[in-house]
Amino acid sequence: MSLREIVATNLRHMRHAKGLSQEELADRAGINRNYVGMLEREEHAATVDMLERIATILDIDPMEFFRKSS
């Protein structure tokens, strides 16, 4: 599993766990909704700064994006 795939999967799971739509997450982070979808579909790789911003919205440690689930 590629790192991009791990980040995408974790982002999707964490967003769902918080009960947020892509649009709600994007609005709170001040980014385009399409961007969140692109991250989750592995069409775009987020910068470290963007992952930090999204992690703040999700109230998680940014390192959680990189944890490979077993």
Image (cartoon, rainbow, N blue to C red):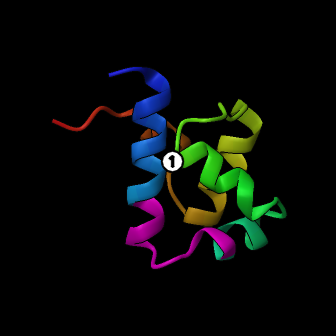
Q: Is residue 10 left or right of residue 42?
A: left
Provide the secondary structure element on which disc 1 rests. loop
In the rendered image, residue 39, in percent from the top left (x then y), is placed at 60, 44
> What is the x, y in percent for residue 38?
64, 46
Residue 1, relative to residue 55: is it above or below? above
Query: Taking 31 as reference, is 22 above or below it?
Result: below
Residue 3 rendering spot, x and y as whole percentages: 45, 23
- Give the residue drawn at x 77%, y 72%: 27
Residue nearest the viewer, comparing 48 with 59: 48
- Residue 20 forms part of the magenta stretch: yes
| Position in image of residue 8 (x %, y %) | 48, 42
Residue 66 makes an appearance in the image: no
Stretch in magenta: 14-23
- The number of discs equals 1
The quarter holding residue 30 reads bottom right
Q: Quadrant of the N terminus?
A: top left
Q: Is residue 70 left or right of residue 54?
A: left
Q: Quadrant of the C terminus?
A: top left
Residue at 50% x, 56% y is 60
Q: Residue furthest left?
A: 70
Q: Is residue 2 magenta?
A: no
Q: Is residue 41 visible?
A: yes
Tell me what residue is drawn at x 68 percent, y 35 percent.
46
> Looking at numbered disc 1 in the image, what kind of residue is underneath it?
Asp
Q: Please tell me which residue is depicted at 48% across the width and 51% down the height of the picture.
A: 11
Pick out the residue farthest to the top. 2
Residue at image mark 1: 61
Decide: is 32 above or below 6: below
Q: Residues within 10 Å of mark 1 (few under 14, many from 20)?
A: few
Tell me if residue 43 comes above or below residue 37 in the rendering: above
SS assignment for the magenta stretch, majority: helix
